[in-house]
Image (spheres, helix red, strand yellow):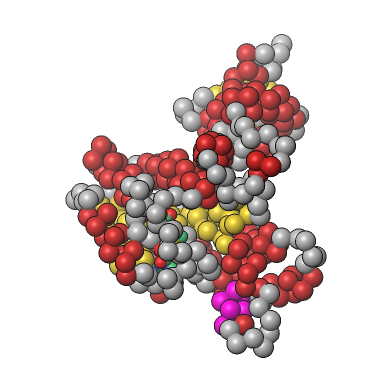
């Protein structure tokens, strides 16, 4: 297949896709529900694939249309859903999956084609709508300039988010193509387009033997995105197994603290699912079983062990003397546990501190990211 997926890609989910889809399962409904309460919402699945695996599990396209359709039916919400897929076979399957979910409130635009060509036009049509673009290629994604343009359409003051698959493997494989080799110039150009310049060449020359070039380039890519979009960028590494290199990072770009908070929660749930799936595999995808490392992950135990640290971090924040909203300081509360523990851990830590008389919570909304925290005044 020329579009980058291997022949058995759509047979069933592999472990990285299990992570990716759990993250979508948790995050997408929150994004869609929150923003559709005030406006029609635009969603783009730019590398949509076949929509569903051969074993019947939903792919990203089926997941998104189902979430949107549920909200359309139950709450009358309206969505504009854009799907692009380059491969003819996959596109045919995709269209039949999408056709199962029609509703008058879903405006569905599914085409066989290249998202890099269509993205600009889609943005133009949604100047007045919040928008999330999920861009999930197997190799290099859309040109960097288009990513920046997407985020910076915020001149129209509409919430915009990106969730990108940044393939470490593609960069590891391609960056070393020797100048002068037949295909090297074209490959190098693709990398340069994908990251917005040839800055990667000096990084490649300088990176030490043994360093993972995929990690090196992902970190610099994220730094540049922050600088060019003034948004916050979260890099979420995804692996085939605990001992292998990162295969890709999911990169979440947003300007909303509450959205970033929900993504941290989704990441922790995706980790849990990833571990549970890995542990249940009869033949793990590497020889991890040969190592003495623990093969068990117990989320409740993990929360119990990390809660004292969370409470300490919250108390530390209070020493700065100002009240705060949880979403604004979540990375400082979570510290090194960011992405490994769910929202309920922060909730429990805060409620315990309140019971201990250390903090006062103003519960503005049910969701913990909106809670306002201040030090309890003792007379
Ligand atoms: C990783 S798969 C997508 C998986 C899917 N997002 C999911 O999670 O279920 C990448 C897909 O992008 C398609 N593709 C590759 N280049 C493309 C392009 N420029 N525009 C649209 N689709 C493309 C491939 O044919 C392949 O089906």
Q: Residue at x 69, y 81 (%)?
A: 178
Q: Position of residue 357 (x, y in %)?
A: 67, 14
Q: Residue at x 39, y 54 (%)?
A: 11
User: Eyeballing the image, is 345 above or below 273?
Assistant: above
Farthest residue to the top: give it.
Answer: 379
The quarter holding residue 361 reads top right
Residue 314: image quadrant is top right
Q: Residue at x 44, y 73 (%)?
A: 2
How many labels sit on residues? 0
Residue 322 in the image: x percent, y percent?
69, 32
List x then y, in percent, for residue 122: 36, 66
* Quarter of the rendering containing residue 66: top left
Q: Nearer the viewer, residue 156 or 148?
A: 148
* Up/down of 251 relative to 221, above or below: above
Residue 188 inside the magenta-drawn segment: yes
Assign the C terminus to one quadrant of the image: top right
- Kindly identify the residue that appears in the image at 52 percent across and 58 percent down: 164
Q: Is residue 379 above or below residue 123?
A: above
Q: Magenta stretch: give its range.
A: 186-192
């Amino acid at each position: 297949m020329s579009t980058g997926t291997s022949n058995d890609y759509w047979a069933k989910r592999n472990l990285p896709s299990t992570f990716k889809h759990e993250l979508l399962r948790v995050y997408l409904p929150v994004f869609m529900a929150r923003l559709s309460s005030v406006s029609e919402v635009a969603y783009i699945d730019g590398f949509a694939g076949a929509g569903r695996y051969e074993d019947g599990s939903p792919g990203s396209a089926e997941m998104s249309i189902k979430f949107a359709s549920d909200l359309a039916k139950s709450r009358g919400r309206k969505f504009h859903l854009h799907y692009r897929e380059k491969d003819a076979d996959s596109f045919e399957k995709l269209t039949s999956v999408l056709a199962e979910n029609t509703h008058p409130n879903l405006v569905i635009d599914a085409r066989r084609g290249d998202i890099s060509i269509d993205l600009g036009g889609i943005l133009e049509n949604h100047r007045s709508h919040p928008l999330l673009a999920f861009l999930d290629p197997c190799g290099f994604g859309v040109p960097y300039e288009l990513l920046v343009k997407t985020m910076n359409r915020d001149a129209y003051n509409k919430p915009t988010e990106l969730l990108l698959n940044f393939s470490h493997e593609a960069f590891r494989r391609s960056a070393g193509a020797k100048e002068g080799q037949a295909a090297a110039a074209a490959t190098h150009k693709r990398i340069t387009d994908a990251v917005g310049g040839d800055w990667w060449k000096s990084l490649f020359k300088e990176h030490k033997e043994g360093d993972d070039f995929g990690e090196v380039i992902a970190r610099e890519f994220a730094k540049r995105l922050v600088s060019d979009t003034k948004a916050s960028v979260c890099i979420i590494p995804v692996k085939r197994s605990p001992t292998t290199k990162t295969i890709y990072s999911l990169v979440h770009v947003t300007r909303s603290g509450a959205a970033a908070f929900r993504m941290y929660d989704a990441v922790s749930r995706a980790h849990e699912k990833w571990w549970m799936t890995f542990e249940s595999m009869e033949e793990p995808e590497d020889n991890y079983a040969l190592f003495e490392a623990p093969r068990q992950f117990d989320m409740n135990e993990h929360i119990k062990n990390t809660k004292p640290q969370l409470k300490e971090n919250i108390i530390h924040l209070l020493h700065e003397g100002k009240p705060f909203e949880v979403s604004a300081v979540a990375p400082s509360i979570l510290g090194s546990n960011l992405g490994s523990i769910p929202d309920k851990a922060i909730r429990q830590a805060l409620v315990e501190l309140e019971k201990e008389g250390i903090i006062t919570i103003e519960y503005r909304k049910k969701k913990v990211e909106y809670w306002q925290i201040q030090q309890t005044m003792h007379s």
